[in-house]
Image (cartoon, helix red, strand yellow):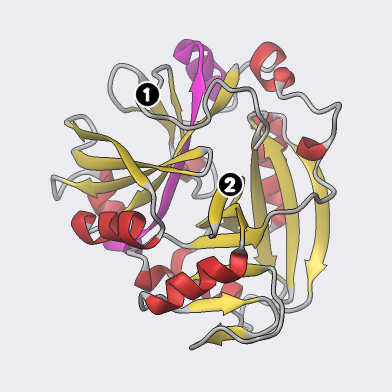
Amino acid sequence: MSEIVRLFHGSQIVHDVLEVGRFYHDFFGSWVYEAQHLGAEDSRNSANLLGGDFSIEMLAPVDRQAPTSIARFLGRHGNHFNNIAFWVKDCRGLAQRLVENGVRVSLRGLGVVDEIPDQDFDYVIAHPRDTYGSALEFLEDQVIPDPRHREWWSPAFWRDRHPLGIEALSHCTVAVNDLAGAAGFYTDVLGCELVHEEEDSTRSSHSLFFAIGDTLIELAEPTSEGSELARHLEAHGPIVYAFTFRVADLQRVVAHARDHEIGVIQQGSHTVELDPADTFGAVYGFTERELPGHPGLGEGDAT
């Protein structure tokens, strides 16, 4: 039986991996551990560790006018988060379950398929239009040249020495306009457990939090037409919206952002978000609270 094991990375499509990479280096103290050209999409790729256990993969099309999915996404959304990737056991079984539930999938080297072929494959991407905005990538669990797989790896630098004081990833947020439908996909298709529900009057949102592998995914639906979340949905549709880190001291985060001339948006008494206008479209949040039901926080395992 297939099992979603742990988070691999978030993904962001950008206009220039070098320019956006400088932001990650200067603000987060990121570590680039992989950089390559992806021939299938004719794009530049850069994998960046930040926040200790979290990796963001950046992809930029070589030709922004080319008819590739990455170039089309950039033309539609600009610099923006694209998907969330997980390691799984039995990728084939998960792909089969997705297809049986009406979810279009892409397989490595085969593109979008209507049925699962006999030949081997090691990753599957679920189409976000069939998952209520959750662009999810699943890869067969394996050891790769990733620092987090090394015995010497430690996320302590970002917790103890970097000004942000990041302890761990708190959760990933997907903006949705059909909360009930999206929740059904996570429970009925992916088999995830609903661990927390809340109304956020500051952000004007109704959220459901699901444990998926070692991670929390928040499905957030706006409750007010004038909220930032509602405006984002109007502009982009259902989509991966934000990644939020748990920190020990929000004032350190605010001070670091001001030092880098990055705007900060207050989201309640325990959470702030960076202004995406100053971060190449990336919504990063920071919170002092520990959400109920988190499957991995505090265990010390690299994701």
* Residue under the point 82% across and 55% down: 35
Quarter occupied by the C terminus: top right
Say which element carries label 1: strand
* Residue under the point 85% across and 48% down: 145
The answer to whether any part of residue 67 appears in the image is no
Q: Which residue occupies the foreground of this view, 215 or 193?
A: 193
Callout 2 amino acid: Val
Q: Position of residue 128 (x, y in %)?
A: 41, 68
103 w.r.t. 264: above or below: below
Return the residue found at the far left: 224
Say which element carries label 2: strand
Can you identify the residue that label 1 sits on?
A: 271
Callout 1 amino acid: Thr
Is residue 112 shown left or right of residue 289? right
Can you identify the residue that label 2 sits on?
A: 5
* Residue under the point 39% across and 54% down: 191
Q: Is residue 27 magenta?
A: no
Disc nearer the start of the sequence (1/2)? 2
The residue mark sitting in front, 1 or 2, is 2
* Residue 263 image-quadrant placement: top left
Residue interval drawn in magenta:
234-259
Distance between the alpha carbons at the discs numbered 1 and 2: 28 Å
Q: Which residue occupies the foreground of this view, 49 or 250?
A: 49
* Residue 117 image-quadrant placement: bottom right
* Residue under the point 25% across and 41% down: 207
Q: Which residue occupies the foreground of this view, 170 or 189?
A: 189
Q: Position of residue 62 (x, y in %)?
A: 73, 73
Q: Position of residue 163 (x, y in %)?
A: 63, 16
Q: Position of residue 86 (x, y in %)?
A: 58, 52
